[in-house]
DNA sequence: GCCAACGTTGGC
DNA sequence: GCCAACGTTGGC
């Protein structure tokens, strides 16, 4: 099993919204298409059913980890890329050869906020992709070591 | 709101 | 294939 960290801006989608979804399952991220090749490739090539991921809230007052999710549907074409009226419409994408993908995630549990500043205080976590300068990737792998350490915080 | 860092685009 | 210009991200 692999581990991941997936970012969402609270102004777009919060963990409360995930919690309040009846099935506690959503496509990642609802109403928003992921338009980054590296993130897409992670979903397509490296994510498996049952993988776990941290829910990370970014671009807000208290950035940090707020929960754990499970990957419950493997990468599939993002419907927004075919929707002409959508901001995420991509004219270069075809049904036969879709360019952008999504996965479904299910809430495992909420966590008390682990702030970014807290994560930065651990020397063992200094190589985490999320902590690297200039990091902008919305989906990043987390090592087993990092995963277990963060779970002990 | 600022701005550094990064990814993408498009002219050549 | 290079690279300048541009748009976006996201911490502060």
Image: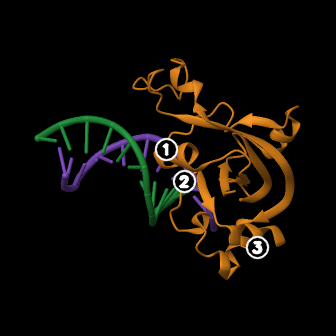
Chain colours: A orange, B green, C purple
Image position, residue B7 (x, y; %): 42, 49
Q: Does residue A136 appear in this view? A: yes
Residue shown at the point (79%, 65%) measured from the top left: A114
The residue where tag 1 is placed is A36
Residue shown at the point (61%, 76%) measured from the top left: A126
The residue where tag 3 is placed is A149
Between marks 3 and 2, how big is the CA–CA gap?
Answer: 22 Å
* Mark toward the viewer: 3 or 2: 3
Between marks 1 and 3, how big is the CA–CA gap?
Answer: 28 Å
Question: In terms of sequence position, does the residue under pointer 1 or pointer 3 come before the other?
Answer: 1
| Secondary structure beneath label 3 | helix
The residue where tag 2 is placed is A137
For the residues labelled 2 and 1, say whether their Cβ atoms are less than 8 Å apart: yes
Residue shown at the point (69%, 33%) measured from the top left: A30
Image position, residue B8 (x, y; %): 39, 42
| Secondary structure beneath label 1 | loop
């Amino acid at each position: 099993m692999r581990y991941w960290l997936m970012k969402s801006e609270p102004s777009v989608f919060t963990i409360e919204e995930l919690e309040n979804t009846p099935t506690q399952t959503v496509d990642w991220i609802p109403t928003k298409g992921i338009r980054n090749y590296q993130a897409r490739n992670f979903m397509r090539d490296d994510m498996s059913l049952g993988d776990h991921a941290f829910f990370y809230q970014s671009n807000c007052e208290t950035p940090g980890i707020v929960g754990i999710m499970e990957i419950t549907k493997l990468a599939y074409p993002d419907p927004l890329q075919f929707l002409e009226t959508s901001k995420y419409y991509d004219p270069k994408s075809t049904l036969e050869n879709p360019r952008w993908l999504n996965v479904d995630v299910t809430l495992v549990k909420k966590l008390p906020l682990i702030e970014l500043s807290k994560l930065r205080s651990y020397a063992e976590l200094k190589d985490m992709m999320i902590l690297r300068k200039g990091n902008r990737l919305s989906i990043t792998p987390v090592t087993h070591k990092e995963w277990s350490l963060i779970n002990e915080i």
